[in-house]
Each structure stands twice: as structure tokens, then as C-alpha cells.
Image (cartoon, helix red, strand yellow):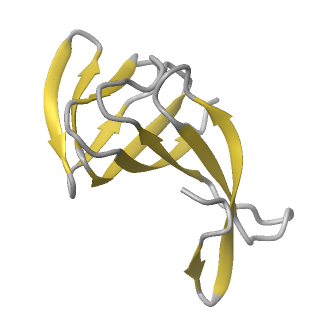
Amino acid sequence: MSSTNSATTGGLPVKFEHWYDFTEGGRVHRALLPFPPTTPAPFEVARWSVAPKTSNDLDVHRSREVWVIVSGTGTLTWADQTTVLHAGDVTAFESKVPHQIRNDGPDPLLAVSIYWLQEND
């Protein structure tokens, strides 16, 4: 995923920049949302990839999060449960729930993450 790619919202480009790399899986890019600092969006957006036969890092945080699987297939583990996700699937995590996905397929798993803090955080 090139950081030069962008999406649009209301005609304003949403730029992505490299944020960090998973230990084994792939790269994470964070969106730079085009809203003024005086009225920021109540959420943030990232996109990431997980290479075949690897996993993203086990993650747990205080924000709620939604994943949209863009392509690929993987086994999602959250808390003490597992399920298989495919392209087009969407999953949501409450805050402080450990979660991780292992790419079971032959192609990179690509996903978009939308995350935000609860009002009392």
C-alpha cells in the first residue's frame, strides 16, 4: 500500500502516511483527515496489510474500533473467541478487547480501521 494513494471526502483528499510496521505482518498507514483542528473528526482512520501466513500484532486499546476487510481471508481472534473473516466483512471491537488476525490465504489481507474514543475517555 503506497502512502501516495488517497481517498476523497467531499472533494477533499485524504492522505495516508506510514505510521508503523507490524512485527511480522505488514505496514500500517494512518489517514490525515482534512478537517480543521478547531472541529476535528470524532474518529481516526488507518489502513493496513497482513502478509500471507503472518499475523498483525495483538492489539488492545481504550478506543472502540471497526475493521473493514478489503481483500484476503483471515482468522480473527478477539478475547477468547475466533471467526474467519473474508473480503467485504466488517467487525467491531469494544474498547480494551484484545484482537488479532492471522492471514490464512495466499494473498495479502488488506483492511481499513476506523477507531474513536468513548466520550468518557
29 or 121: nearer the viewer? 29
Q: Position of residue 71 (x, y in %)?
A: 28, 54
- For the point 31% across and 34% down, which residue is it? 52
117 or 82: nearer the viewer? 82
Which residue reaches farthest top? 80
Q: Position of residue 6 (x, y in %)?
A: 61, 72
Which residue reaches farthest bottom? 11
Tell me if residue 117 can be seen. Answer: no
Tell me if residue 57 can be seen. Answer: yes
Q: Position of residue 109 (x, y in %)?
A: 33, 44
- For the point 22% across and 9% down, which residue is it? 80
Q: Where 83 sits versus 80, above or below?
A: below
Which residue reaches farthest front? 106
Q: Position of residue 70 (x, y in %)?
A: 32, 57
- For the point 65% across and 71% down, which residue is it? 14
Q: Where 27 sits versus 29, above or below?
A: above
Left or right placement of residue 65 versus residue 116 in this view: left
46 or 53: nearer the viewer? 53
- For the point 39% across and 45% down, which residue is it? 66
Left or right placement of residue 93 versus residue 106 in this view: right
Left or right placement of residue 76 versus residue 41 in this view: left
Which residue reaches farthest left? 83
Quarter holding the C terminus?
Answer: top right
Q: Where 88 sits versus 106, above or below?
A: below
